[in-house]
Amino acid sequence: MATMTTNGTASAPCAHELTTTNVQVNFETHRVAQTGTDHDAERVPGRYTAIMAAAGVLFVGVGYTNTFGVFQEYYLQNTLRNERPEKIIVIGSTAASLYLILGVFTGRFADLIGYRPSLFTGTVLMVGSMFAASVSKTYVQFLLSQGIMFGLGLAFVYLPAVSIARQYWKQNHGVANAIVVSGGALGGTVLPYVVRRLIAEKGLPQTFRLLGYIAAGGLAPSMLFLKPARPIIPLWRRRDSGGGRPPILDFTLLRDPRFNALVLASTVAMVGFLPRYFLLPDSAVAQGISVTYSAWLLGLMNGLSIIGRIGIGWVADRFGKVNALTLSYVLCGLGHLIFWLPAVIMPSENVATTTAMFTCFVVYVGLLGSGFVSLLPVVVSHLFGPEALASKQGLLNTTVGLATLAGPSAVYAIVGSGETRHWANGVLSAGLFMLVGGLLLGALLSSSLKVGRRIRNVD
């Protein structure tokens, strides 16, 4: 298909084509040779059970990490009441980011060894972490079990889950992966209420043990049904054209300017991703909103993000995947500045107006500002091809995960502790990171076109 240059003349098909208007980016990537993952991908049997199994994995994995606000509240008042809040939050942010940071290793493990060994390893670690946490007493023990051990297990199951949709859906990859990732949102909606009630009725140790049983039930089906459309040949049986084995780690994408642009922009944006999950309930309570309603706000945001992610997936499939990712980052950042920031600035005596602003924020962000989570694997597949997608997404996740780990602690440090907390500064920081990341995504990918135009499409 011929394209138009900036001066209006026709040019030969270009491998990486982009135009930018008001931070809207359109790509036409290099067409790779058709593989088994593309050919009749949407007719392969087992696609629905694979997607549901993947959603079940994220219901447990991401859903559990989204419940940490409930645990944090309990720790501050009971088990770890002598620890600083910014120190306790490291437990939750470690679990919520370690699975991203280790992506360069666990994604490659899944692609080279197989999805089933990866899922089995992750399941054992995640279930085991809950039982280890049930006997924990000190900060270090909770960090090792609920933070590091759970995050490590989630690292092994996460990338097979978010990579499987592309193997069965080519045309509707955005919507299919949104359904998978919405499993985590559903878990984040249901599990905080379950955890809060279990702690109140059963106590902390028994709560962790029951969560371990729930995790086993949710993760076990993945080992049966979450399997690639085509079997993965183990590393020890593979040979390339020269007779050698594929590399253990593959960093070739780091030579692609488009990938580096995506890494930088997403790293900036993801610093502002997690703070709302940790700070929203506390900031609402500080403004005079009840603890019950504050917890309900977090559940509402997670629930509405299911609709938002499927909606932005539909937009991505029809109007451009990079466009949708850019838009999602920008809209999320604007939501912080338009709704959440005024809510924490208002006098706490004006509870009715403050409650309305907090509610508007979670509705807005749930519907319009949560889609980037499901879009990252879709964009990576779109730009760089679906082959070894877990490895490619894992390479991106490793850098992004460092920002995700730093975000909550950094913003919490900005907010401060004690009676005087600077909520406005924390909310402003998180919103600006998201907004700037979206703007960078458009600007940097636009600049990378100058390099991409030198690579011509080879049919």
Image (cartoon, rainbow, N blue to C red):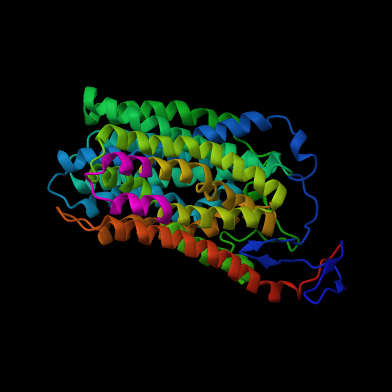
Reply yes or no: does residue 61 show up in magenta.
Answer: no
Front-most of 196 and 303?
Answer: 303
Magenta residue span: 337-357
Question: Which quadrant of the figure has residue 259?
Answer: bottom right
- Answer left or right for 171 relative to 151: right
Residue 367: x %, y % from top left: 52, 42
Which residue is drawn at the image coordinates 42% and 54% (left, top)? 338
Front-most of 385 and 243?
Answer: 385
Task: Answer above or below: position of 351 versus 216.
Answer: below
Residue 222: x %, y % from top left: 54, 32
Front-most of 152 and 418?
Answer: 418
Residue 347: x %, y % from top left: 24, 50
Residue 394: x %, y % from top left: 54, 55
Which residue is drawn at the image coordinates 18% and 55% (left, top)? 417
- Answer left or right for 240 relative to 65: right
Classify the position of the N terminus by image quarter: bottom right
Q: Main secondary structure of the magenta part?
A: helix
